Amino acid sequence: MKGDYIFTSESVTLGHPDKLCDQVSDAIVDNFLKGDPSSSIVAECALASGVMFISAHYTSQAKFDISGVARDLIRGVGYTPREFNADDCTILTSFQNHTATDYNPVDLDQLGNTEIDRITAKHPATLFGYACDQTKTLMPLPIFLAHRLADQLDSPGVRKKLPYLLPDGKAQVAIEYSDGRPKRIHSICLVTSETDASEVDLNQLRGDMIQHVIEPVMKKQKFPADIKTNIFVNPEGLVIGGGPAVHSGLTGRKTGMDTYGEYARHSGAALSGKDPLRIDRVGAYAARYAAKNVVAAGLATECEVQLSYTVGAARPISVHVRTFGTGEVSDVELAARLDSAIDFRVGAIVRDFRLQKMPAEIAGFYKKLAVYGQMGREDLKVPWEKTDKVKDLV
């Protein structure tokens, strides 16, 4: 995007019902893979007041209580029993165990090229990865700041100082661009939920949010808020109760938030709740990895990588690059260099990123990805954020 415009992105906290569903789905993935790295799993969750529905299809040797995982996660988020009771809520389930007929254990580290070629995409998918030089993580500035604010709102220090807060909130950041480059923060909006109207009023809430959430985040930024930045805190009033007591949730509803804050294209499929051999998950990671390495190499200030897979093929049938006029070499040349430097075969990506083994190495790996975005997560040292292909691209 070029010219002058304002762009807005949003993030939500870990207690938002959609993110509760994403976390439950990914906690299920974590537990299956921790117990059996060869597990195949698709888990989805829906949530409303007092009721959670979990659907899971899987093949695995792992054994654990799926409903218990969900209750533990809800309990840890911090809702009071009035908003969502982890012990008494109804959990409806539909589990399909396909292990007896479809289980096929594979250690990718032990496979040669011929065997890796036999691991193919099971359905067609077109994935997009994006990177730009607006932030240190090579993510668009609006979603980068929105995630930082949501993370700060969830932080234990804020929760301790402001006990009236419930864990359902959202942060929205609007950036003013000039000639396609970030110029200033136009506005910041925080919406939080509260336990009781008698414990806080709007004026106090606004002061607390500025002091404990906005200022600590902004003072660390290259583009801090200025005197003209509009600050909105619960512009429609207090939200008493919040969470599942107020609105429902669903796995995969926040795909834009999981990726680039709608600043760039992304596939419409959910990332959460799927084992890493699912191409719509691993392909999105591989595309981000490719785009980030292009920008990190100084070959463009903005890069989109498109990977298209078809059923029965291990490799993408298309690797397409767009640098929006910022490339040091042609987009066609960059696509060729990426295809040479990175093994985009499904099995190779999972093997090289160690995606089946991450839950055993980092506790709750996929569950942690389910909040504050799955791209740009240098805090978790995720493999698709590495820039180790720079030398191969220049």
Image (cartoon, rainbow, N blue to C red):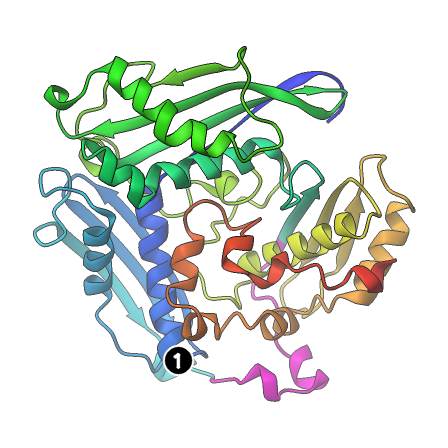
When the figure is inspected, residue 305 is found, relative to residue 198, above or below; the finding is below
Front residue (pair 352, 183) = 183
Which residue position is annotated with label 1?
36
Name the spot of residue 253 as percent of width and height, x first.
Answer: 41, 41
Residue 170 placement: quadrant = top left
When the figure is inspected, residue 377 is found, relative to residue 152, above or below; the finding is below
At 44% from the left edge and 33% from the top edge, which residue is drawn?
216
Name the spot of residue 340 as percent of width and height, x first.
Answer: 83, 66
Q: Residue furthest top?
A: 228
Position of the N terminus by quadrant: top right
Q: Is residue 109 in the magenta section?
A: yes
Residue 142 placement: quadrant = top right
Front residue (pair 123, 238) = 238
At 23% from the left edge and 23% from the top edge, which residue is drawn?
239
Q: Work out whether residue 16 can be spotted.
A: no
Name the spot of residue 80 as percent of width and height, x first.
Answer: 13, 42
**Three-letter amino acid code at the position of disc 1:** Asp
- Is 100 on the left or on the right of 128, as rendered? left
Front residue (pair 87, 344) = 87
Q: Which residues are magenta?
A: 105-125
When the figure is inspected, residue 169 is found, relative to residue 336, above or below; the finding is above
How many neighbours does mark 1 have within 10 angstroms: few (below 14), some (14-19), or many (20 or more)? some
